[in-house]
Amino acid sequence: MYKGYLCLTLHAHLPYVRHPEEEYFLEENWLYEAMTETYIPLINAFENLVRDKVDFRITMSMTPTLCSMLQDPLLQSRYLRHLNKLIELAEKELHRTGFQPEFHGVALMYHRRLTESKAIFRKYNYDLVQAFKRFQNMGYIEIITCGATHGFLPLLNVNPASVRAQIFIGAEHYTKTFGRPPKGIWLPECGYFPGLDKVLKEAGIRYFFADSHGVLNSDPVPRNSVYAPIYCPSGVAAFGRDWESSKQVWSSKEGYPGDANYREYYKDIGFELDYDYIKPYIHPSGLRVNTGFKYWRITGNSHYKEAYMPDNAKNKAAEHAGNFMFNREKQIEHLISRMSRKPIIVAPYDAELFGHWWFEGPLWIEFLARKIYHDQNIVKMITPSEYLTEYPVNQVCQPSASSWGYQGYNDFWVNCSNDWIYKHLEICGKRMAEAANKYAKYLNKKGNSLYKRALNQAGRELVLSEASDWAFIMKTGTMVPYAHKRTKVHLNRFNKLYSDITNGTVDKEWLTKVEYLDNIFHSIDTAKYYLDKKKFNIRKPAKAGRVKKKKLKTKEKVNV
Amino acid sequence: MSAKRQKVIRRVYEEGRETTVKPVKKHSVQKKKNLLSPVPKKLPPVNPVKKVKPSSKVKIKIFDNRSIEKVLSKRKLVYKNTRIDRLKLPEVTGKRIKPAEVFTRKESAIGEIAVPGVVERVTPTPPKMTLSPEEQRNLFIDSHELPKSYDHTYISLLIKDPYCIFAHWETSERSVSGVRAKYGEQAFSSARKIIRMNDVTLIDYNGENANSYFDIDVGPFSTSWYINLWCDNISYIGEIGYVFQDGRFESLAKSNIVYLPRMGYSPRTEQIWMKVTDRLFTPPFVFLDETSKAGSDGRSHTEGSVGYHQDNTGGTGAFESRHEETGTRREIRHSIDEKDIVLRYEKSFDTAKKDKQVTGRRRIYYLTDEDIRQYYAKLTPLLRDVLAARLAKMKAARPGYELGIAGDSALYRMWLFGFLPAGSFIRRMIRTGSSEVMMLLGGSEQLVSSFASGGSENISAVKIKQRTFFFELNTELIVYGRTEPDADVWMGSTKVPLRPDGTFSMRFALPDGRIPLEFTAESRDKEEKRVINTYVARNTHYGNP
């Protein structure tokens, strides 16, 4: 009856920005904006679908950095403070737009959304990860993991230990957060290189996502192109992105988010209103930031903008959802004439697109799920593991090295703006592996010796500096000084820890303070993943040796 | 800062040796305090003769990361190295110092807003870290630049795209002077520093057997290079070194091997297929399993695997998932066929092999409380109610048990069911769900006797009291048809014998369930074929009319 499948994947990622040493940190706004505009509306959409008994499947990748931030009490309290301020601003806006009918409706909408967001935030005990976990346990969404701090693996492969650490730490963090081992992984920026699948297999991961050309250019040529997964020689499955469905949403010219009825992102009251009015709601230093209150719609490519009309936008989102579904139907009907099995259309997007950049995005997802469930029976939504259950036999091909960045390879992360970091990352990676192997005996003991803590903290600093977000920011040029600072700070702290460990002069006080500041993965022993494979479980061979000796003794006695 | 101190700082940081560094002078500490924290009410005593220039007036800046950067960039950081005796072994403490204990706890102002009426207090309030500006600088160490050189000779290649490689290297003074010493000053002065890119596609490179190579003149000062190539899908190893006028090449370091990605379709079109099956005991599959031996350890997996289990700890996990039959609209199954459970139960007796247990047509279930309730509701009311009553009495006799669920709900009954001894006949019968058997055995009487004897493990010990009133019902199925006498008729894959006049009839038992009947008739000369498919379904319900 169903002729094909749609695998909608949302990749939710934010770099680890947590600065307890300052009250109002500018870059933490990224998290608050994402929570208010993307994650909470998505949870709302899922709740509505569950309440209305609509069956849907969405794959979500939640990176360890994002999960750590969402579960951190400090950031949760700061977010609540932020949300309260926004609600207060919403009330003021209601007064201000009282005599402007075209804006008052929008102001009412924002007020309602913010109060509902706060209710949802409270409902899940201030922890949004529990919300997504709940939907996963119900079976509606499948959450997959990512590299520990979203480090770009093809460029880290100079040190295989770094790659192993990124993946294993990500998998362990996922297991601790969601209570089960991860089935799939979203490789950071879809960056794949041949040989990475062996590491994934060791970590117990069943599948990953690759960009279209990674699968299309694989060796030998896949029979079903991107519409069926391929197995890497080690047995890990690779799902290729479908270009057609991506273009409909991502394209700046023809994509849905550019429609004239949708909300304009760039006209925010934080930049437009009186300084005195808006001062409590922007950065305390006076720097104007986005507040999230935008009253205009796109209208066209020019500077002329008209007032935003929520109902029109909602209807348009429904229309676009129907259009997307119609296109997938036609695509599947075309594909089944050439394939002997049901095709799977993999449509991965950044989660921040839905809600943050495209305000009506979560609405669109909700409409899409409803329409697919009720209005037709050609497409069905599915998660990758369900597809692999249905089709356990797949073609064996070696995907080619690729990424989903600009130009399709590693161009974006190694160019004149950010190539200087790789020398340091490589040497620090080698140093970490060397230190871990040299002091492996501290890592295997139970308890928290000073050296174990220092090694683990060194692992954390290294992993934080390897984040591909800093290189990305340096290339796009948005907040470059911050990216420079983060890279330098973490590498400097790592170097100090390394020199302290090798010289035997670890400063306990300093270490405690750094552990407080960089407390990502605080419950995970990060250093042990840098050990050589042979030394990974160093305890077991020692015990086996002891037992053997005992046996020999008894034999000798018997002989004598 | 003096040149001497600069030297000291550099030595400390770059070479990693511990050195006692002079502590920061007092007046400079005071200055920093004035800048980065609010001006204290009582200023420390200053020499009144000194004239304060307006340019050096203390400015109170708002505390944010930009202002910190400006301030810190003007000062250089000093590591405060506390001397620890190297001979002392590092202490192994079992306790982990909680960061919160180190810092003073302050009442956090988070959540309090000036606007009246909206006051939100968030519990727990995280501790506010109080760091002195000096400590902050120590921790940030971001105005410190990354080391310019690690004093290590290496070359490393990174892929940028299929036609470009990024190379970065460093040649330490020692290596360069080693080359100079080996070849002599004269030869060295006319030598060129190059990168030799060796094409090592599909070979094991041992230093000499490269497919080809080319050289890039990089000069003595640069440390990175973008190498543009003309061919994709090949691999390279780079070497940094000096090439002399007579053609000799002295390699200082060899790089890692890089494999350029392919920029187009592969020429190979053969198809290799592989089957990879999931480890079925891990999520998202629910595994409805029975213990292989009846009454072995008393813990039935069925009871463990239904209900809401949020955290799966591996093994036979228990949480909800959905399964749909391929090709049908997704329906939520609200009932579990007793036959399936009997099937699985029997199978678990036969083999201990796990894979056999899941070759049944349904191995994934969606189970909710409703499913369980409906399953138990299928039992005869007589048995269920009596059982509940008996168990309640049994429970009352043991006052230690807490009753969490009250009332006459099915959940309550299910909970009570857990008190039955594991190997009891009743438990097995209920689980296998053969209500037919219960009817035959005469439910209530049998129960009374079993409970009176304290629960019996042995079936034969229980007296089966026959009742005088009985009612049985059974069905058989006759299928008949006709075709040409010389034709072939198949039912499924078995051939059906025809009578001389071309008719046939078959008679078989008709149990509960759905029996598909697919008949195919083919003419003698194989030219024509007819197919007729039908099915018969029987669904028995025992109970009160």
Image: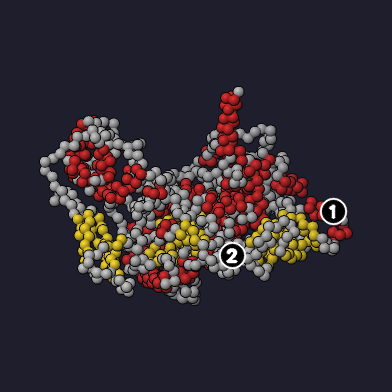
Residue sitting nearer the eye, A230 or A183 = A230
> Which residue is depicted at the point 59% across and 68% down?
B263
Give the image quarter of residue A535.
top right
Q: Identify the element where label 1 is drawn.
A: helix
> Percent position (x, y) of residue A445?
57, 37
What amino acid is found at the position of numbered circle 1 in the picture?
Lys
Disc 2 crowd rating (10 Å Cα; few below 14, some 14-19, many 20+) is many
Residue sitting nearer the eye, A381 or B61 = A381
> Percent position (x, y) of residue A21?
55, 48
User: Which chain letter matches label 1?
Assistant: B
Residue A349 appears in the rendering: no
> Which residue is depicted at the point 59% across and 58% down?
A154
Compared with A301, B386 (above or below) is above
Give the image quarter of residue B488.
bottom left
Compared with A549, B522 (above or below) is below
- Confirm whether circles 2 and 1 share one chain: no
Q: Identify the element where label 2 is drawn.
A: loop
Compared with A242, A206 (above or below) is above
Name the residue at the right extreme: B186
Tell me the tag on residue B182.
Answer: 1
- The residue that label 2 is drawn on is A409
